[in-house]
Image (cartoon, rainbow, N blue to C red):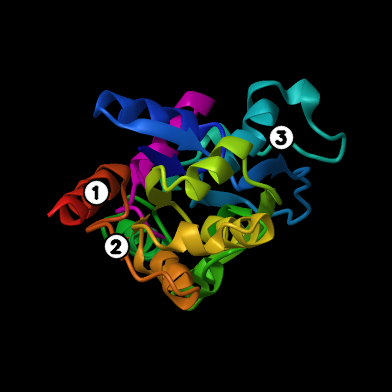
Amino acid sequence: MSILVTRPHPDNEATADNLRARGHVVLLAPVLKFEPVAFHDESEANYSAIIVTSANAIRAVAPLLQDPGLQDPGLKDLGLLKLPLFAVGEHTATAARDAGFGEVIIAGGDAASLRDKVIQSVREKVLKKKGTLLYLAGADLSRDLGGELGAEGFSVVTQTTYRMAPVKILPRDVCDGFAAHGIRAVLHYSRRSARAFLEAARDEGVEISALAIPQCCLSETVAAVLRDAGASQVLVAASPDENALFGTLERALRTRLA
């Protein structure tokens, strides 16, 4: 019996390793594919800090930061690595440090905590003023973080640095696993990946089997997608981090065995 991980590559490999270390058999079905978007800054702004809600945003710009020769001719030297960077959580913070950012401030794992961390940083004088923030973002945003910070007096320049494209098919071993009732639970990390998973499962004709088992979700917004699709066993991590998600998985498996 296997645990299905829908997280995109390359993060799914680390998740699989962690699950195997806990004694689980793992199947991978990355239902979204990372695609970087060319970075063109035309704002002429002097940024006071950077905000990032995904490690993918760091991956998209890292080659430009580490090798200015790769930059588009129209992209000026912004000195981004010298700016404080607010990361949504520890995973994103690690990616930022690996890319060369020296001052990384970590929020509590979701966009709301990131917003609050930025606001708090001004009160605590980590940031000297409510200046202009550079938001390195994905093409599809789950909330208007820039607007929320704008309402607090910040100027936010949002730069789309990547998109996550849906993968239309599930791997054959995953389809076979659903058909043979050999998958014990599915792990979901984002609302978009949950939707992409449902679409792929529907196209492959395994939707009923896929939704009949526990769906372990990183947050309530992710869980809502599965509930709306008809899943009856939807569990939500106590906090938006992978260790909490693994705890939810273990709880789901114990419940099924009881």
Q: Is residue 1 left or right of residue 204?
A: left
Q: Which residue is drawn at 79% across and 31% down?
A: 71
Q: Residue at x 35, y 71 (%)?
A: 232
Measured as percent of width and height from the top left, residue 129 is found at 42, 60
Splitting the image into 4 quarters, where does residue 20 fall? top left
Q: Is residue 92 left or right of residue 239?
A: right
Splitting the image into 4 quarters, where does residue 24 fall? top left
Chain-order first, disc 3 or disc 1: 3
Measured as percent of width and height from the top left, residue 16 is found at 40, 31
User: Which residues, given as a range, are shown in magenta?
Assistant: 89-110
Label 3 and label 1: CA atoms lie apart by: 40 Å
Visible residue check, residue 118: yes
Nearer to us of marks 2 and 1 is 2
Q: Which residue is drawn at 73% across and 24% down?
A: 68
- Queried whether the magenta region covers residue 94, the answer comes back as yes
Q: Mark 1 points at which residue?
A: 244
Measured as percent of width and height from the top left, residue 8 is found at 56, 41
Measured as percent of width and height from the top left, residue 30 is found at 57, 42
Circle 2 sits in a helix, a strand or a loop, which is it?
Answer: strand
Q: Looking at the image, is 92 positioned above or below residue 212?
A: above
Circle 1 sits in a helix, a strand or a loop, which is it?
Answer: helix
Q: Mark 2 points at which residue?
A: 235
Foreground: 65 or 252? 252
Q: Mark 3 points at which residue?
A: 77
Q: Is residue 150 left or right of residue 159?
A: left
| Residue at the extreme left | 258
